Image (spheres, rainbow, N blue to C red):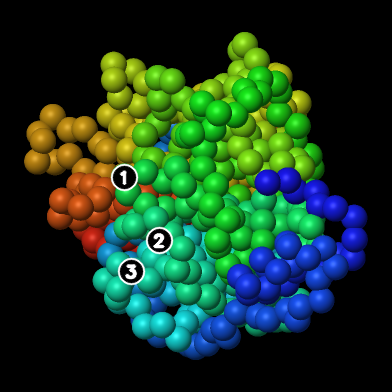
Amino acid sequence: MQGEGQPGRVMKLRNLTIAGLIAAISIPAATSAQVGGLPATVVDYGQAVANESSFPTFDRAGRPDGTARWRVVTGTGNCCENYVGSSARGRLFDFGGSFLRFSDDLGKSWKEVRSITRLVNGEGAISGAPGGDIVGATWDPYSGDHLLSFKYDAEAETWLHQELLLHTPFFDRPWFAVIPGPFTFGAIETPYITVLKGGWPSKDVAYYSLDGLNYFLPTEKDSRQFTGSPVERWLDVKPAPTLDWMQPNTATGITPLGNLGALWTESDSLSFATDSPEMALMQPPDIEWSPFSFPKGGRDNGRYLVDSRGRLHHVVPLFHDGTARSFLYEISSDGGRTWNERRLELPDRHIVEDWDFKANAKLGIAALAVHAHRNEKQESKEADQDMVYELDIRSDGARIKSLYYVGNGDANVGAGLGSNLRFDFATVTILVGGQIVTSFVDQMHTTPAMAILIAR
């Protein structure tokens, strides 16, 4: 499917129904009225509880450096996960549960965005979008396999939602990404497209939306490895201010490149690397995926982000004797041709279990959140420690500012069904004031909680 349509009258796309979109694509000179999604209800959310705690801090050499103060918030996610995000206007989001929740005062008070559909125990994903829009989706199997999309329309200053009937069975753990445009499809012009994927055991099939609400254009990566024309080149990455605020959780595996294109990697599982990674590239104006690899010497595994300066960030765990005990954090200003490398060593006896990272070029800060397992001589004393590396990225290389422990590190948890205590994935975001927000778990917070850095 091509992103550039035939010349003709262009209809600005805001919130178009499926029928309207099909008609618009079929008829270049579209005249059908635009119809929005269903209005969502915003209410005070009183189940979130905020308290303050202090946790250890370490300097760039790994030496103890006092403590940092965190605002710990419980009750915004679900049993096993948070999914945090933030906007350029300073709003903090969590879509770990059935409904999207947000705070405008660093987690002290919260609002909830509700649909007319009653949900029991959902799990969601969220992202910023161009123009100040916010888009997300949640899946709840317990109320009858409901998949709902949510959108904040910044121009209309309203929240909307929509029931999504087209999706693969058992749409477990939705992931979400936004690719900035503008894109033109026949008679329709849209400032961005969104990509939603989920399902178990595979998330290869994803769905496009042209309005941030309706998802009915399927796309997938794996079969294109056999039918598509392979692409081997350096990435064309473009600066865009919105890219600091449109970075999905890196487990999503889809990275917007700022040029109407995107990179799709194998990072949509909790695996750290693969022996034969399969990457795919969306090249404008085509929104289909082509098999992709860097030229010799490029990086074919790990997770990627692009910041507002058009720099490519790459993070991959490094394995020692079969376990990951450190990270390689790299920044490229030329699409992957050259890299500035920084090795991040985990504290002694710690092993990587999961991670997420964000990079905000305007603030000059990157944050790498790590959920690590700590080995002890006595197995009964083994536990997990959540931590965050704060990195200075004002130059083209990352420099460690601080390492923060988050939580008490006294709970041994797992991911997925079968674990008595669950922490399904790490998540982190950076607010406009430079505050780092991450999820964590310990014996005091056996349901994952959110921590907001309020004083270093």
Q: Residue at 39%, 66% (x, y): give it.
A: 139
Q: As shown in the figure, which amino acid type bears the numbered disc 2?
A: Asn
Q: Which of the two labelled residues, at mark 1 and mark 2, occupies the earlier sequence position?
A: 2
Residue corresponding to mark 2: 82
- Spatial CA distance of label 3 from label 2 is 20 Å
- Locate residue 331, reporting x and y percent: 65, 29
| Front in this rendered view, residue 423 or 150 | 150
- Tell me which corner region of the image, top left, top right, bottom left or bottom right, holds residue 260: top right
Residue at image location 47% in from the left, 82% down from the top: 115
Residue under pointer 1: 201
Instruction: Give coordinates of residue 183: x percent, y percent.
Output: 77, 54
Out of 298 and 140, give the one closest to the viewer. 140
For the residues carrying marks 1 and 2, which lies nearer the camera in this image? 1
Q: Are marks 3 and 2 in contact (CB under 8 Å)?
A: no
In the picture provided, is 20 more to the left or to the right than 123?
A: right
Q: Which mark is residue 231?
A: none
Q: Which residue is mark 3?
A: 145
User: Residue at coordinates 23% horizontally, 47% vertically from top-left?
Assistant: 414
